[in-house]
Image (cartoon, rainbow, N blue to C red):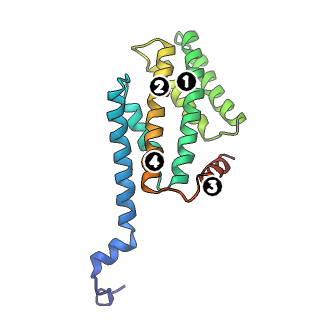
Amino acid sequence: MPFDQQTPQGPLVNCWQQVHFGEHAIASFKTALAAALSLWLGHLLRLDHTYWAAISAIVVTGSDVRVTFTSCLDRIIGTAIGALIGWATAYAWHGHVLLYGFAVAVCVLVCSALQFHKAGHLAAVALTVIVLANLDATPGRAAWGRFLEVSLGIIVALVVTLLFTPPKSIKTVVKRGAADQT
């Protein structure tokens, strides 16, 4: 649109409206608030690695409740399965690369068998953190801590999203989120 045909508001305001900047600003604020609250609560609860709570909040916060709910469901299921398999793998690990690869495959396979296909890679990430990056705790404590830290971020992100964009019906959100899994 030529400059002289812009609305009376001017080209800057027109551009602002076209890119839906207000919606993006709200989404950015929601994400930042969820991350900061997760970090703060993690410190308050004395979790070992509170950055996982903040990272999880950032990863799962979506543009609307349905997107956030689906992401939360994938992440919590993936983390739970990965923590369990990671816990078991860490006891047998002893640097065997093939055992690690097998455990990653099991994570993806279990999630797929349970019809949570997107959670498989998240399970493999949780397993990897527990098996390869666990330097300061027993495998059981690392698995439990990882699950708690991620869960905190997920819960905070969901609450923040619900406060900013409450759904008309929570049943609709749950049904659509479950349908996205298949």
Q: Residue at x 54, y 37 (%)?
A: 75
Identify the secondary structure beneath mark 4. Answer: loop
Q: Nearer the viewer, mark 4 or mark 3?
A: 3
The first of marks 3 and 1 along the sequence is: 1
User: What residue does disc 3 label?
Assistant: 172
User: What residue does disc 4 label?
Assistant: 61
Residue 83 is tagged as: 1
Residue 68 location in percent, x, y?
51, 49
The first of marks 2 and 3 along the sequence is: 2
Please tell me whether residue 85 is drawn above or below residue 59 in the rendered image. above
The first of marks 2 and 4 along the sequence is: 4
Question: Can you tell which quarter of the image residue 118 is in?
Answer: top right
Question: Do the residues bearing badges 2 and 3 touch, measured as CB atoms within 8 Å?
Answer: no
Q: Residue at x 54, y 14 (%)?
A: 90
Looking at numbered disc 3 in the image, what kind of residue is underneath it?
Answer: Thr
Q: Nearer the viewer, mark 3 or mark 1?
A: 3
Residue 74 location in percent, x, y?
57, 40
Looking at numbered disc 2 in the image, what kind of residue is underneath it?
Answer: Arg
Identify the secondary structure beneath mark 3. Answer: helix
